Image (spheres, rainbow, N blue to C red):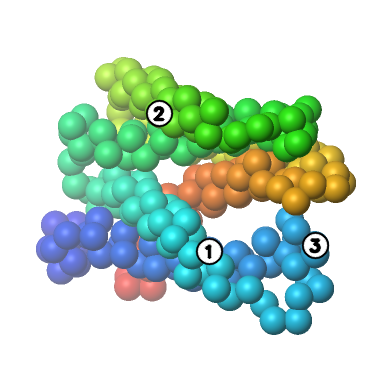
Amino acid sequence: MADKATHEGPRYPWLHWGAIMTGLYLVLLLTMTMPFLMAAFPQLRQIERMPWEFFLNVPFPLFLGVVLISQFLLIRVPVRLQVGRPVSRSGLWLPILATGFWMGCLLMGGILSGMECFMTWDAVEDPGDYWLLWTGLPLLLWVVWAVVFWRWSGRMDPRSLMERQQKWMLRGSVLELLVAVPTHIVARGRAECCAGLLTFFGLTMGVTVMLLAFGPAVFVLFYARWKRLRG
């Protein structure tokens, strides 16, 4: 019966379910974006016409694409585990890269939030002078976290590894928000045109990674419900 049910399902279940969950995630992100912006920058509420052109600026579509691809990759292994498909260690490297990338973003968000809390933009002559910080440190953090998760994959089964990754992402996002929220409040209280940009990056990373961590768990619940309805 199990084999028959598996063959009656989609030929590539991780593509099928990945597309569904990624689509739901896209709707959630688009729905939350403008309220999140207005909460972080209250002055936007005074604008009569909402700045919808924000959605067309290059950074936002690029960010949206990276987030959706990451969610798709994080769903892949849980889908294969739920439908009874084998998962080899070589099939874990894409989810590991995605998780390592966002863990690095969390750390970067915490570092930048702390920097903006204890410095002023007036003291920065040229942000381009910090190019090593903007480029080298994120890449280093990405590589370090990817290596850590890859080493774990050698001593853990795929299900345990995915669960541990989700826990680290969830815990990391909570800790990062505990830093980003108060520092953003401090930064927004300053009379500077760019105040709050770095802490806003920290807020964005914290909320984004938290939602990404919930994605595989939501899929498991959704899939279980779908199976019960089919049964």
Disc 2 element: helix
Horizontal side of 137 relative to 195 (left or right) equals: left
Using the rendered image of the protein, determine whether residue 37 is visible from the camera's viewpoint: yes
For the residue carrying disc 2, how many other residues have a C-alpha within 10 Å: few (<14), some (14-19), or many (20+)?
Answer: some
Residue type at numbered disc 2? Leu
The front one of 180 and 80 is: 180
Residue 167 left/right relative to 177:
left
Disc number placed over residue 29 in the picture, else none: 1
User: Badge 1, how many Cα within 10 Å: few under 14, some, many 20+?
Assistant: some
Query: Which residue of the protein is positioned furthest toward the bottom in this rendering?
Result: 49
Give yes or no for contact between labels 1 and 2 (Cβ–Cβ under 8 Å).
no
Q: CA distance from mark 1 to mark 2?
A: 25 Å
Q: Which numbered tag is attached to residue 42?
A: 3
Q: Position of residue 93 (x, y in %)?
A: 26, 33
Q: Residue at x 32, y 73 (%)?
A: 230
Q: Which residue is mark 2?
A: 139
Among numbered discs 1 and 2, the one appearing first in the sequence: 1
